[in-house]
Amino acid sequence: MTSPPQRDRRSVHAATRLLSLAAGVALSACSTPAMRPPAPSVPLAVAFGHAPEAQAQGAAAGTEWWAAWKDPALTALVEEALSANQDIAIALQHVAQARAGADAQASRLWPTVGVQASASRSDSGLPAPVKQGMPDTRALRAGVDVAWEIDLAGGLRAARDAAQADSTAAVAGVQGARLLVASEVARQYFVLRSAEERLRIVSALADAQRQTAAHVESRLREGQASAFDHDRARAEADALDAQVPALRTLVGTTQTRLAVLLGRSPSVRVLDADQGFTWPAVRAIAAGQPSELLRRRPDLVAAEARVGAEALRTAEARAQWWPKLFLSALVGRQDLRLNALDLAPVHFSNVALAFAMPVFNAGRIEAGARVQSARADEALLAWQKSVLVAVQEVEDSLLVRSQEAERNAALALTVEHRRRSLQRAESLQREGQIDLLVLLDVQRSVLSSELALSESRLQQALADVQLYKALGGGFPTTQPSTDMTSLAARTPQ
């Protein structure tokens, strides 16, 4: 006859063998092939249609593309924003959440191990003869509890890989936030400098027209000019003065936007006016190939990761149809005392293997799989649309840059010629060869041309910012942090 200690040891050995076998079954399916990346809905061209051949040898967008303008103030603003902006900090918290979620999903593949212990004592206070039937007891019990869901159908692994794909999307989201912040700081900086330049242009011409009005007033007193001429000159000066508040408002609101981007108080001025600011020269930017956007643009990397995550969750939903195995084991030691008599300590074990499989659930599992499949299709369509929009943004930026360069060159010649005509008109008006209306018309034409040239220079700079943004900002090529798993290879069909 087998003694109790031998039976206990055999139970422990049996539980150990069963756990080892289950571990081998679960770990044998962990190695799976990589999943194919999605394909765009339409083939991408070899090169961008609006990229001039001369720009093919241009400078590529570097990781610090804002330094290409060689403006220390702009560089300082962007670097401060990248370290202090609140949107970037929020995106980093999204990464922390996604990684914690991935760790939580990965933990479901492993057993849950716990320790339990108990101590109990019972003293009836009865006489010794009576205690033979109702003994006083003291029990000390300790053991290790193991619970494990064996992932036969691959649902838990699919959930783990989906969470890892979410983490990849969150990391790309941080890069996307950095790109948006850097491009918005550059945009607001150039808007600010343009507003300051236009304010100087309008103020200078308003001073000139006030001087003209004063001169006309002097001639009116001498009877050499009419009241109509005087009123016209004053009206022109007043019209220019009316443009000043709007430009000052633009300067002020741009300052507050920059302050928020930098994480500063909007009540504190960010930049002082730069009287010597000059617009950066136009430079060639290599656009590369449209296919490179799939890895350069953070939004496309994030969208692709979401496609993989939703496809894996579809596999997780379909795995609910298949059997599940649950293993539980309790192994421990017990020390028992009866009426001051210490019994020999004993080992105990309790091992159970449970099997569960759905038979009828009124279509709930199938409906859940269809819902998740539709979400996967939606994520794929969203990614395909994002690819087309990304190519469109690059094409539009290239077109704007080329056309704005031609417009800028024509406006520069226009300003030069009209300034010359203004000098001649002022000389002729002083000599009395032309009347005041002609001079005012020439002054208005000069103002219009200078403001148009300033606006064109702003649009050129903004087109450069938009192109850098559309190209992905020059941030390092983003690769998925983990290989997503082939659904067909790991999900029962």
Image (tube, rainbow, N blue to C red):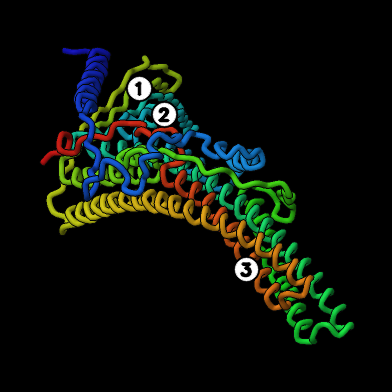
Q: Nearer the viewer, mark 3 or mark 1?
A: 3
Amino acid on which the number 2 mark rests in the picture: Gln
The quadrant where residue 12 appears? top left
Q: What secondary structure is found at the residue carrying circle 3?
A: helix
Where is residue 493, by image quadrant? top left
Q: Earlier in the sequence, mark 2 or mark 1?
A: 2
Q: Amino acid at mark 1?
A: Gly
Measure the C-alpha gap from mark 3 to mark 1: 96 Å
In the displayed image of the protein, which residue is found farthest to the left?
A: 493
Q: Earlier in the sequence, mark 2 or mark 3?
A: 2
Find out whether the residues at labels 2 and 3 contact each other: C-beta distance under 8 Å.
Answer: no
Q: Which residue is mark 3?
A: 445
Separation of residues labelled 2 and 1 (CA atoms):
9 Å
Q: Which residue is mark 2?
A: 116
Q: Residue 218: x percent and y percent?
A: 87, 78
Rendering coords of residue 109 (x, y %): 30, 32
Q: In the rendered structure, find residue 97 and report the number of the disc placed on it.
A: none
Label 1 residue SS: strand
Q: Nearer the viewer, residue 116 or 430?
A: 430
N-terminal-most mark, 3 or 1:
1
Tell me the residue that label 1 is attached to. Answer: 332
